Amino acid sequence: MPTTAPAGRTDRGTHRGTDRRPRLALVAAAVALVAAACVRYVDPVFQQVTTTTNLVYATAPDLVTGAPVQLRLDLYQPAGDQVASRPAIIWVHGGGFRVGNKTALAQVATDYAKRGYVTLSINYRLDPGNRCQDVQDGEITDPEELEAERARCARAIIAAQHDAQAAVRWLRANATTYRVDPGRIAMGGFSAGAVTALHVAYRSDDPGDVGDHDGQDSRIQAALAASGCNYFPDSIGPGDAPVFLLASEYDAAVPFECAEEVAQRAHDAGLVAETLFYLGEGTHAKALYDKYKATVDQRWTAFLVEQLGLASP
């Protein structure tokens, strides 16, 4: 705890005549020991991150107007990193497929870039008028209206998946430029972004046609889902990517039972599906992550190291 000299007293000359070099050497040695104890891909081994904003990764028709819109991402790299081929994480924001922006995950992307990953935070097409939550919660009783809103919601959900897959293809097409290992790409998301990450993990047979890199693979090697659900459960099968499901029992936005079903179906198919379920808790998505950040990061990084086959260089 810092101390302060009493008022009117000046502690001048306390260290007069003392050689401070041994003390400085001890401090330097302590710093070196701390650095040596840090593990790349697990701990924040870099202090600074280089950010490149608003890179266009694809163009696609707006979900409301149909006019072409540019899809943009922000890219984060550990400053001073010399590794030639690095794993990457594509982060997808939440917002009910209605609202949201890539800047919402700037801190998460920065934190993981400091661990040695190349990270991206993407925008994707949204439909501000969708009633996905009302459909899920049974708030629409008119059969015709319900059918129309279900179709509108499905279109927004699938568009987000296709946009995220376009970001995967863009990253692989630019892997050399950004020194990314194209065989070690993960996707993480919160709420609607978690839904999207799971759909990219489990629906690789439907890559869409967004973007200019159709020759690139759309598959990912791991997915992190905070308050997510696979709304196409029959899509889960052998060969799909390993996933990590973070969820709370009383989540009012995404049913906890859906996260449980995803894990069970994955296990039944012989897939990896790790879970971190908070029972008696109702916090959602990014707020849930923030509340238990230390524990979640420890589990997420261990999952990524294992599933991406990472070793600190």
Image (spheres, rainbow, N blue to C red):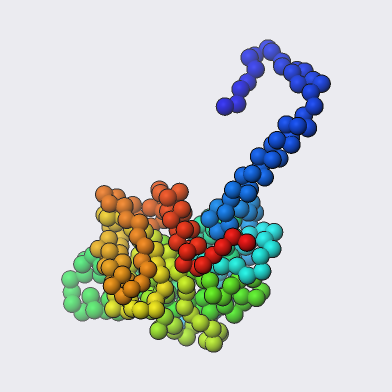
Q: Position of residue 210 (x, y in %)?
A: 49, 83
Q: How many marks?
A: 0
Residue in the foreground of this view, choosing between 286 and 123? 286
Q: Position of residue 47 (x, y in %)?
A: 64, 51
Above or below, 104 relative to 140: above
Residue in the foreground of this view, choosing between 119 and 211? 119
Above or below, 308 relative to 9: below
Q: Is residue 210 left or right of residue 80?
A: left
Above or below, 49 relative to 142: above
Confirm whether residue 132 shows in the render. Answer: no
Residue at point 63% right, 14% down? 6
Q: Position of residue 26 (x, y in %)?
A: 70, 35
Residue at point 76% right, 21% down? 15
Q: Is residue 279 left or right of residue 42?
A: left
Residue at point 21% right, 79% down? 144
Q: Position of residue 109 (x, y in %)?
A: 54, 60
Considering the image in quadrants, where does the C terminus appear? bottom right
Residue in the foreground of this view, choosing between 85 and 101? 85
Confirm whether residue 270 shows in the render. Answer: yes
Residue extending farthest to the top is 8
Residue at point 61% right, 22% down? 3
Residue in the foreground of this view, choosing between 255 and 79? 79
Residue extending farthest to the right is 17
Considering the image in quadrants, where does the N terminus appear? top right
